[in-house]
């Protein structure tokens, strides 16, 4: 192999797996990557632990050593839990600061299991579409049922629809629905779930790293919007299939458990996204749209005797964490 070819394969793809108190899932994720890494020369993985404090560091370190993964896995424990963007950025920053930085960086949740060929499908897509900045996998349940993982940017209309939940209104606002039906073919989209999101190196060089002022949620939406505004489109690639055990770290998005009260950081992230990207007045309008729609939904739910599947205190928590109550300072 020539020197130039060696440099091309030296570090083509860098994966970042961010663990927070899910060491067993993280190790299972690494197991699913063994054959994928072998099939893609120049692939390296960094596992970041966000100060779990639950024995994760010992468990993951031991698994890497005992399995002989040290030649392709780097473990990076953090001294504090600064959130999703903070943990991922630590590994991304280190990868970009190497003499031969990777062409692509893949953010991969620890609560995932990669199907055979999933990484190669994303790399091949990015190789053949040099104008695309971000590509996301098809996320699915263990039985193959697809999850919605390609989305539109949120807007006043999508917030109204999300709160109101009325069929005829949803049909009228379908063009603005954040989560459109799952596509069976590759297609351009506004943003993809950060559970399996590949980013071209030049995107980071153009727009910077993810915004660490988001603790959790909305950071990948914000990042994809910044990339979009800089001329880097985002695509959904269903040929890349990844099993996703939803919400295992936070529990917020786990649809298979009784919903718990939504944490303050979710509302903070939502407020930051709208104020930062669209201004305080637009943020207030989205809050009014969602809150009024949701109040009507709660009334209709009570009258019709529909089951209550919402997190406790959702409306009051939403209002107390709104721009009107907390201000537009982000």
Image (tube, helix red, strand yellow):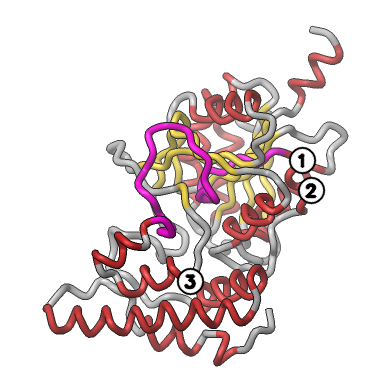
Q: Who's the residue at 70% across and 24% down the image?
A: 42
Image quadrant of residue 170?
bottom left
Of residues 87 and 294, the one drawn nearer to the viewer in this rendering: 294
Mark 1 — residue? 202
How crowded pointer 1 is (Cα within 10 Å; few <14, some 14-19, many 20+) is rated as few
Q: Earlier in the sequence, mark 1 or mark 3?
A: 3
Q: CA distance from mark 1 to mark 3?
A: 31 Å
Name above or below for residue 71 compared with residue 295. Answer: above
Residue 252: x percent and y percent? Answer: 41, 66
Instruction: Judge from the rendering whether residue 14 lies leftward or rightward of residue 299; answer left or right.
Output: right
From the image, state whether disc 2 or disc 3 is nearer to you. 3
Element at badge 1? helix
Residue 221: x percent and y percent? Answer: 57, 58
Instruction: Judge from the rendering whether residue 237 lies leftward or rightward of residue 211; answer left or right.
Output: left
Residue 279: x percent and y percent? Answer: 65, 76
How crowded pointer 2 is (Cα within 10 Å; few <14, some 14-19, many 20+) is rated as few
Q: Who's the residue at 63% across and 68% down the image?
A: 214
Name above or below for residue 13 compared with residue 277. Answer: above
Mark 2 — residue? 206
Disc 2 and disc 1 in contact, CB within 8 angstroms? yes
Q: In the orientation shown, which residue stands out farthest toward the bottom?
A: 325
Name above or below for residue 146 compared with residue 259. Answer: above
Q: Magenta segment range?
A: 175-200
Q: Who's the residue at 43% across and 79% down the image?
A: 289
The quadrant in which the N terminus is found is top right
Residue 42 inside the magenta-drawn segment: no
What numbered label is drawn on residue 156?
Answer: 3
Of residues 209 and 91, the one drawn nearer to the viewer in this rendering: 209
Q: CA distance from mark 2 to mark 1?
A: 6 Å
Q: Who's the residue at 74% across and 28% down the image?
A: 11
Element at badge 2? helix
Q: In the orientation shown, which residue stands out farthest toward the top?
A: 1
């Amino acid at each position: 192999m020539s020197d130039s070819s060696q440099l091309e394969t030296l570090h083509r793809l860098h994966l970042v797996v961010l663990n927070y108190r899910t060491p067993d899932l993280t190790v299972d994720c690494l197991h699913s990557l063994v054959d994928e890494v072998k099939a893609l020369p120049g692939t390296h993985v960094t596992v970041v632990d966000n100060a779990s404090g639950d024995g994760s560091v010992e468990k993951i370190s031991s698994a890497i050593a005992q399995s002989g993964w040290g030649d392709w896995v780097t473990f990076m424990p953090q001294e504090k839990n600064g959130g999703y963007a903070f943990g991922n950025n630590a590994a991304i920053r280190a990868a970009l600061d190497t003499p031969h930085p990777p062409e692509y960086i893949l953010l991969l949740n620890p609560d995932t299991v990669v199907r055979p060929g999933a990484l190669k499908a994303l790399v091949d897509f990015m190789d053949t579409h040099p104008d695309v900045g971000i590509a996301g996998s098809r996320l699915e349940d263990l039985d193959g049922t697809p999850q919605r993982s390609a989305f539109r940017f949120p807007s006043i209309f999508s917030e109204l629809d999300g709160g109101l939940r009325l069929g005829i209104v949803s049909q009228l606002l379908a063009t603005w629905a954040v989560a459109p039906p799952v596509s069976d073919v590759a297609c351009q989209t506004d943003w993809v779930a950060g559970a399996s999101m590949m980013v071209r190196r030049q995107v980071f060089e153009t727009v910077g790293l993810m915004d660490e002022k988001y603790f959790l949620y909305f950071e990948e939406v914000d990042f994809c919007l910044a990339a979009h505004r800089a001329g880097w489109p985002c695509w959904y690639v269903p040929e890349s299939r990844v099993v996703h055990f939803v919400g295992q770290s936070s529990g917020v998005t786990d649809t298979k458990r009784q919903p718990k009260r939504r944490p303050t950081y979710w509302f903070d992230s939502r407020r930051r996204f709208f104020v930062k990207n669209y201004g305080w007045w637009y943020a207030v309008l989205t809050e009014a749209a969602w809150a009024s729609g949701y109040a009507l939904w709660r009334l209709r739910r009570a009258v019709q005797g529909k089951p209550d599947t919402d997190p406790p205190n959702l409306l009051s928590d939403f209002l107390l964490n709104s721009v009107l109550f907390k201000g537009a300072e982000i």
